[in-house]
């Protein structure tokens, strides 16, 4: 176990090293940060002076060594735009992203397990077919579009006049499909409550919850269908296995067979995939946060790219690298807990 | 700003909003803004950008400001006169207070001008200014090294800062007045201006909050905004959605695709303004020999259908241009209209010996100007009809400028707004013969060089007889039109949108800096 963690720690160091080298190697293609700092009419001589001051004219190795030595002491450089240490900027934006991912994960877990299990148990029921159909649609719509549609329906409101207003059923249908649109369309709102340090939470007030619903639903929309289908497929396979048949033959109640015997084994691959997907979800937040102006890391990263804020870009990439390593490690640990036959060792088996 | 201060400010603000000391009956109102960008810094001399200048008009006041018709409106300067060819005397408003409580005097103006001359971004604009001197508490004399007719134009950039507040040292021994690019200077985090609004809270890139300044000097204004919440929303679709859903009251830069949607919305109004930013193309004469021939340049100009682009591609959201200066500028010449004549263009190509055309590379940004990449695509197609084969590359802004500075393509798109709101500025940056030393023609991508035009514009800039100066600049426009040193496409419009009852029309202008201190909000459901 200890050996396993040490091995993972070394993984993390390696990942950060590789990311930092790659990020440094491409920084010239990310744009000219000086261009973002000065007015259009500022002469070249002034720009050159700034470039010199920020050390942008030094050769690659000099720049990288300087960065690496500072990074070893926990200093990832200053963000050009925020005028603060890059790590502080990320720390400032991290809570918003984590809360968003958490809310989306919650939605996914609460919906995918019952729906997946149900459609595995009753694959022929119309409800199952309906969910399978929906999930195909859901998986193929980009997050960006989902988000815009959600905003149109629930924030701006929709006035449907498709049906004849003069008839009673027409006006009822029109009213039924039209929406009021009172949900907040962007940001975290005024309902955030400070927890500690940089952390302000959206979960502590009704106002805050209202703000997180649409972004988390749109973030969940891409993963939810995947998990429903995954759980359904795994469950169906498990239901065919001998031990389930044996359990049924023994006369154990169906409920117990489904939710204790079968579901446990279904969850094994789901946890593995889920862990990896949480990392991927951090990446998807870039789109969701942009549309909803959610002040998290994703929005911050996209802005940093537009502004060629190189220190912040590099720090972000390294932090996301660590998040991936950490989530994978946690997944492996949980896997070991759920399935004791898996041994975590530092040596190859 | 510390939490305590913020709390104190909001308590004071809350205590006073109830008794809003305003001449009108309208109640105090909160304005929620969704701009495409927030101010990069609170130090108004650190960066010359739209975001910072808009902020300057909130927390500070200029000496004079532009009206909608490009006239000068007195603000902190009440009168100005030219004492001799190189000296201007300005009388300052009395009884003005800074947010810190200090009194505003001529010393503050002198200090501000000296600081502007230190600022990398403003040094260029204030180059002609030699010195400023306080004659008495409310009179200041500004001297230029040579006669300079645009002194009053650049006075719109003088937002007096609180000398006393920005003098001295911070706890860690740094000069409070220091200008530090992308650094953590005192002035980039602390503000004391004379403007209608005080910053009460700020999280960079997330939100800025303002309260109306209780001792604001302009008590005549009908403006009744007591609180501002500014959220940057850079994504176009989200910004529009935020307005339509009623989460913000006022947005800038409505994208052309959403113009109709906003126009048709029940509780939102669209305000369109003719802009002053010229969009055009530059031909690289150093790489393509053909472009050195005026006939080929004319052919390119004739092949491009400016009206068509403004009409169909921009959906009327631009004014087709035949010259650099928009209407209202000193050098605007009403004779110069866009040309489009494909047959004549083909003839000219044949005359110049390029009947079979040639191949060129073109670069354009894809997120800087309205529909920039589509415009470049349309222009490429139009050039194909005179057998110029275009290999177009478009890229995001962050990559575009470094690429542009390399000057290693044959044709490049550029948009330019004159910082001085004056014709000469266009020429000096876009078409002057390149000179690395003086910085002339810094954005002359193609290396176009016409010394006659340069001389005319330079002379005009030392001409204090404004009528004569206008004529000279109009002549320069005509010469550039004839010689096609720059392909003008259009002036891109500005579009704002506001919620019903938020009457922004009177306070927005072509310069793109809304004067929100004067904004009147009259929501019906308030009563």
Image (tube, helix red, strand yellow):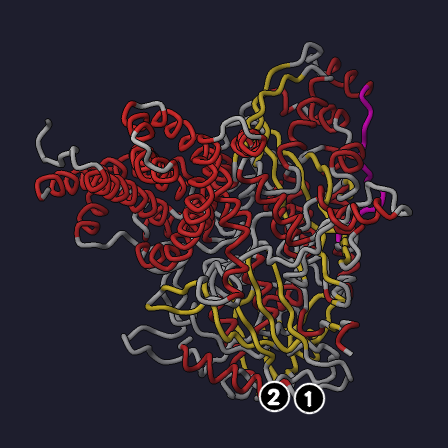
- Helix, strand or loop under label 2: helix
Q: Rate crowding at label 2 as few (under 14), some (14 to 19) or many (20 or more) other CA atoms within 10 Å.
A: some
Left or right: where B356 falls relative to B49: right
The residue under the point 74% across, 34% down is B313
| Near-viewer residue (A130 or B126) | A130
Circles 1 and 2 in contact, beta carbons < 8 Å: yes
- Helix, strand or loop under label 1: loop
Left or right: where A125 falls relative to A84: right
Magenta stretch, main secondary structure class? loop
Image quadrant where residue A30 sits: top left
On-image quarter of the C terminus of chain B? bottom right
The residue under the point 82% across, 39% down is B337
The residue that mark 2 highlights is B16
Gap in angstroms between the C-alphas marked 1 and 2: 8 Å
Q: Nearer the viewer, mark 1 or mark 2?
A: 2
Could you tell me which chain the residue with mark 1 belongs to? B
Residue B299 lies, in percent from the top left, at 74, 23
Could you tell me which chain the residue with mark 2 belongs to? B
Q: Please say if B95 is above or below B225.
A: below
Numbered range of the magenta stretch = B330-342
Q: Which sits earlier in the primary sequence, circle 1 or circle 2?
A: 2
Q: Report whether residue B393 is seen.
A: yes
The residue that mark 1 highlights is B21
Image quadrant where residue A329 sits: top left
Is residue B340 in the magenta section?
yes
Is residue B310 in the magenta section?
no
Picture mark count = 2
The residue under the point 74% across, 65% down is B504
Q: Please say if A85 is above or below B310.
A: below
- Which numbered dot is residue A147? none
């Amino acid at each position: 176990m200890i050996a396993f963690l040490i091995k993972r720690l070394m993984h993390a160091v390696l990942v950060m090293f590789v990311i930092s080298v790659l990020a440094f190697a491409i920084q010239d293609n990310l744009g000219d940060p000086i261009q973002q700092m000065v007015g259009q009419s500022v002469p070249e001589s002034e720009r050159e002076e700034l470039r010199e001051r920020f050390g942008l004219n030094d050769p690659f190795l000099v720049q990288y060594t300087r960065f690496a030595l500072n990074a070893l002491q926990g200093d990832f450089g200053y963000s050009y735009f925020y005028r603060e240490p890059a790590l502080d900027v990320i720390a400032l934006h991290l809570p918003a992203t984590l809360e968003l991912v958490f809310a989306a994960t919650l939605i996914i877990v609460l919906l995918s397990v019952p729906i997946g299990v149900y459609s595995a148990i009753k694959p022929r029921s119309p409800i199952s077919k309906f969910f399978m159909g929906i999930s195909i649609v859901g998986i193929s719509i980009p997050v960006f579009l989902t988000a815009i549609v959600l905003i149109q329906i629930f924030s701006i409101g929709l006035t449907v006049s498709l049906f004849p207003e003069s008839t009673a059923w027409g006006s009822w249908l029109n009213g039924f499909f039209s929406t009021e649109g009172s949900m907040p369309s962007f940001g975290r709102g005024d309902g955030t409550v400070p927890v500690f340090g940089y952390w302000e939470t959206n979960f502590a007030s009704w106002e805050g919850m209202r703000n997180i619903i649409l972004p988390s639903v749109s973030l969940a929309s891409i993963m939810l269908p995947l998990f429903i289908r995954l759980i359904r497929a795994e469950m169906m396979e498990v239901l065919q296995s001998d031990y389930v048949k044996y359990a049924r033959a023994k006369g154990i109640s169906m409920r117990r067979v489904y939710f204790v015997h079968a579901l446990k084994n279904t969850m094994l691959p789901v946890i593995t995939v889920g862990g990896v997907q949480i990392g991927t979800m951090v990446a998807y937040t870039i789109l969701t946060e942009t549309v909803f102006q959610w002040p998290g890391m994703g929005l911050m990263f996209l802005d940093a790219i537009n502004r060629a804020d190189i220190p912040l870009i590099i720090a972000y990439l390294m932090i996301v690298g660590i998040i991936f390593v950490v989530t994978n490690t946690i997944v492996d640990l949980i896997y070991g807990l759920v399935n004791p036959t898996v041994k975590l060792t530092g040596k190859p088996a | 700003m510390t939490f305590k201060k913020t709390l104190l400010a909001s308590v004071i603000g809350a205590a006073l909003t109830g008794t809003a000391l305003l001449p009108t009956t309208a109640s105090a109102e909160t304005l929620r803004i969704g701009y495409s960008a927030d101010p990069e810094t609170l130090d108004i001399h650190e960066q010359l950008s739209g975001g910072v200048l808009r902020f300057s008009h909130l927390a500070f006041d200029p000496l004079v400001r532009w009206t909608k018709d490009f006239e000068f409106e007195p603000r902190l300067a009440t009168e100005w006169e030219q004492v001799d060819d190189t000296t201007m005397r300005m009388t300052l408003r009395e009884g003005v207070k800074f947010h810190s409580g200090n009194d505003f005097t001529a010393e503050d103006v002198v200090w501000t001008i000296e600081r502007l001359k230190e600022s990398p971004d403003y040094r260029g604009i204030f180059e002609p200014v030699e010195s400023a001197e306080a004659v008495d508490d409310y009179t200041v004399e500004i001297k230029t090294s040579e006669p300079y007719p645009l002194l009053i134009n650049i006075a719109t950039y003088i937002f007096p800062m609180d000398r006393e507040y920005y003098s001295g040292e911070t706890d860690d021994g740094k000069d409070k007045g220091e200008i530090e690019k992308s650094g953590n200077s005192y002035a980039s985090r602390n503000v004391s201006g004379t403007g209608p609004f005080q910053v009460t809270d700020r999280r960079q890139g997330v939100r800025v909050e303002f309260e109306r300044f209780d001792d604001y000097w302009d008590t005549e204004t009908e403006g009744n905004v007591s609180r501002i919440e500014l959220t940057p929303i850079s994504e176009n679709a989200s910004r529009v959605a935020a307005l339509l859903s009623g989460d913000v009251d006022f947005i800038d830069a409505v994208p052309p695709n959403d113009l109709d949607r906003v126009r048709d919305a029940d509780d939102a109004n669209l305000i369109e303004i003719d802009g002053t930013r010229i969009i055009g193309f530059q031909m690289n004469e150093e790489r393509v020999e053909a472009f050195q021939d005026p006939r080929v340049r004319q052919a390119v100009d004739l092949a491009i259908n400016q009206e068509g682009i403004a009409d169909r591609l921009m959906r009327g959201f631009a004014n087709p241009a035949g010259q650099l200066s928009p209407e209202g500028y000193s050098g605007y010449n009403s004779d110069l209209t866009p040309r489009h004549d494909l047959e004549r263009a083909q003839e000219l190509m044949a005359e110049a010996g390029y009947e079979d055309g040639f191949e060129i590379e073109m670069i354009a940004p894809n997120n800087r100007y309205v529909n920039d990449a589509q415009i470049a695509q349309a222009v490429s197609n139009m050039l194909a009809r005179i057998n110029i084969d275009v290999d177009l590359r478009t890229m995001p802004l962050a990559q575009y400028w470094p690429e542009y500075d390399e000057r290693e393509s044959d044709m490049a798109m550029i948009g330019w707004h004159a910082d001085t709101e004056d014709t000469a500025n266009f020429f000096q940056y876009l078409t002057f013969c390149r000179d690395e030393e003086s910085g002339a023609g810094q954005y002359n991508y193609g290396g176009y060089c016409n010394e006659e035009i340069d001389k005319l514009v330079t002379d005009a800039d030392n001409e204090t007889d404004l009528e004569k100066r206008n004529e000279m600049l109009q002549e320069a426009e005509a010469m550039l039109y004839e010689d096609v040193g720059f392909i003008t496409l259009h002036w891109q419009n500005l579009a704002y949108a506001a919620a019903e009852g938020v009457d922004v029309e009177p306070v927005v202008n072509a310069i793109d800096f809304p004067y929100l201190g004067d904004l009147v909000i009259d929501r019906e459901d308030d009563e």
